[in-house]
C-alpha cells in the first residue's frame, strides 16, 4: 500500500517560471531518495500537487512545502491509502496548464519529455472550473 495526498496552494506573488524549475529540480533530486512520485500542476497562480509514496515521507514533505515561502495557503484536498501509484514513473511530473484549458480530463505519461502530456477538453460555458477539485482521478 502507498499513501496519496493531494493539496492545493497559492503561488507567492513573485513566483515565475524559473522558480518552478527550481522546485522541480529539488523534487526530482530528492523524491527518488524517499520513494516519492507525483505530479505538480500550475495554473492561474495556483499549485495542485499529488504526492504518493510512504506515508511518513509524504507527510514530511508536505510539512516542508507548507513553510516554503514560494507558496502559501496550503489546503489539503484529500488523502488515501492506495494499492498502486498513479504516477509510478514520475519523481515529479509537471503540467503547466494553459489558461485557455479549463478541463483537463486525462493525464497521459510521456516518455519523451519531462513535461507530462495532457489531453483535454474545453468547457465553453464553464470558465470558473475549480482546479481545487481532483478532476483527474
Ligand atoms: C508547490 C511546491 C511543491 C514542491 N514539491 C516538492 C517535491 O515534490 N519534492 C521536494 O523535495 N521538494 C518540493 N518542494 C520544495 C520544498 O519546499 C523544499 O524547498 C525542498 O524540498 C528543499 O530541498 P533541499 O533540502 O534539497 O534544499 C516544493 C515546493 C513548492 C513550493
Image (cartoon, grey):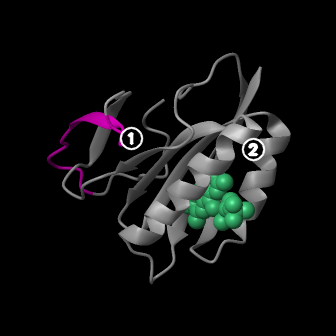
The mark tally for this picture is 2
Foreground mark, 2 or 1?
1
Q: Where is residue 48 shown, x and y percent of the image?
A: 51, 52
Q: Earlier in the sequence, mark 2 or mark 1?
A: 2
Quarter location, residue 113: top left
Q: Is residue 123 inside the magenta stretch? A: yes
Residue at horizontal 42 percent and vertical 52 percent from the top: 131
User: Hey, which quadrant is residue 66 in on the image?
Assistant: bottom right
Q: Which residues are magenta?
A: 113-127
Q: Which residue is mark 2?
A: 58
Question: Can I make out residue 36 in this image?
Answer: yes
Element under disc 1: loop
Q: Nearer the viewer, residue 100 or 12?
A: 12
- The residue to which callout 1 is attached is 114
Category of crowding for the residue at label 2, using alpha-carbon neighbours closer than 10 angstroms: few (below 14), some (14–19), many (at least 20) = many
Residue at x-position 61% and y-position 24%: 85
Looking at the image, the residue that sits furthest to the top is 83
For residue 56, above or below residue 26? above
**C-alpha span from label 2 to label 1:** 22 Å
- Any magenta on residue 68? no
Q: State whether the magenta stretch is mostly helix, strand or loop.
A: loop
- Disc 2 CB within 8 Å of nearest ligand 1 atom: no
Amino acid at each position: 500500500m502507498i499513501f496519496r495526498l493531494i493539496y492545493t496552494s497559492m503561488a507567492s506573488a513573485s513566483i515565475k517560471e524559473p522558480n518552478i524549475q527550481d522546485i522541480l529540480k529539488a523534487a526530482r533530486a530528492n523524491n527518488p531518495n524517499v520513494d516519492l512520485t507525483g505530479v505538480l500542476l500550475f495554473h492561474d497562480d495556483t499549485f495542485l500537487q499529488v504526492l504518493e509514496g510512504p506515508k511518513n515521507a509524504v507527510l514530511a514533505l508536505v510539512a516542508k512545502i507548507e513553510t516554503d515561502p514560494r507558496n502559501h495557503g496550503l489546503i489539503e484536498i484529500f488523502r488515501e491509502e492506495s494499492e498502486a501509484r498513479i504516477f509510478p514513473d514520475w519523481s515529479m511530473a509537471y503540467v503547466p496548464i494553459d489558461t485557455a484549458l479549463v478541463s483537463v480530463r486525462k493525464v497521459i505519461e510521456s516518455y519523451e519529455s519531462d513535461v507530462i502530456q495532457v489531453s483535454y477538453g474545453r468547457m465553453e460555458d464553464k470558465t470558473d472550473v475549480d482546479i481545487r477539485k481532483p478532476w483527474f482521478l
